[in-house]
Amino acid sequence: MREIATDPGRTWGVPDALAGLLAVPLSLLLVVGALALTPGVPGALATVLASAVLAAIGVLVARRAARQSGGFGRALGLDLPRGTDVGRVLAWTLLLFVVQVVAVALLTALVPSLRDAPVENAGFLRDEPLAAVLVVAVLAVVVAPVLEELLFRGLVLRGLMLRLGFWPAAVVSSTFFGVFHAQAGGLDALPIVVATGAFGLGLCVLVRRTARLGPAVGVHALRNAVALVGVLLI
């Protein structure tokens, strides 16, 4: 991964990463508050709202890094998948799916009561109308991978690496990534948090190996697409 500390005039780093992490609980609190004030809001709308709030906060926080380093691409490695990334995206999607399965299997072996807890957070789509499903599909496959990679594997990972090094920064980033995707409360949230966190950790490794967000965006998009198809067909 390119050494961002060499950017002339750079003052962004750990504080910006921490601000990005604070965007996760803040976005969740705002959505929970909105749902409490407007009961009966469809799950699809709540998902869109949570992602929109997180994206808005994340982009605002990342603007300083982009301004100091000559754009989001230079500062955070932000780009889109390329044609040459196809093989890598397919391989890493399969690899990280296996990692998720193993992580959840180990968790349920340690805590048998979690065997019936959900491991995907899109189950609510089975009860949603087609229009809502299409909105969530576009958000999950096209929009969310770019914005979430920008925040979690861009701003947070790179900012924390300046002080903590790669693995601690990757664990912190991936833990918050997992928590953001939890929809249940208490122990029932653990399978999703663990599965998504393991996926996020793998994406951190991929970003480190490629020094780009493009391949991770591709893996993220493909994994979300597979999850949506699986939820709707099963």
Image: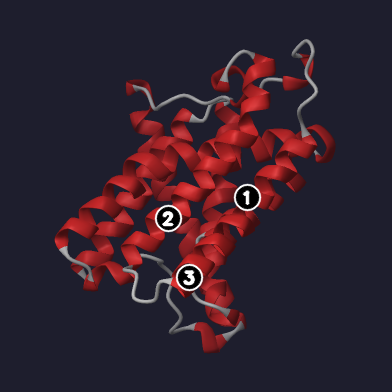
Relative vertical location of residue 40 with respect to residue 74 in this rendering, above or below: below
Q: Is residue 17 above or below residue 110?
A: above
Pick out the residue farthest to the top: 8
- Categorize mark 1 by other alpha carbons within 10 Å: few (<14), some (14-19), many (20+): many
Label 1 secondary element: helix
Q: Residue at 21% x, 52% y: name it.
A: 134
User: Which of labels 2 and 3 is toward the front?
Assistant: 2
For image coordinates 37% across by 40% down, the residue present is 143
* Residue of label 1: 23
Q: Position of residue 184 (x, y in %)?
A: 50, 76
Badge 3 amino acid? Gln
Q: Secondary structure at mark 3?
A: loop
First in residue order: circle 2 vs circle 3: 2
Q: Quadrant of the N terminus?
A: top right
Would residue 46 be found to the left or right of residue 158 on screen?
left
- Within 10 Å of disc 2 (Cα), the crowding (few <14, some 14-19, many 20+) is some
- Three-letter amino acid code of the residue under disc 2: Leu
| Residue 66 vertical placement versus 107 (above, below) | above
Instruction: Say which residue label 3 marks.
Output: 183
Question: Residue at point 33% right, 40% down?
Answer: 142
Q: CA distance from mark 3 to mark 1?
A: 17 Å
Asked whether the viewer can see residue 12, the reply is yes
Q: Earlier in the sequence, mark 3 or mark 1?
A: 1
Q: Amino acid at mark 1?
A: Ala
The one nearer the camera, 141 or 132, is 132
Image spot of residue 84 (x, y percent) = 36, 21
Quarter residue 161 falls in: top right
Q: Is residue 161 left or right of residue 29?
A: right
Q: Which residue is mark 2?
A: 49
Horizontal and vertical percent for residue 94?
39, 49
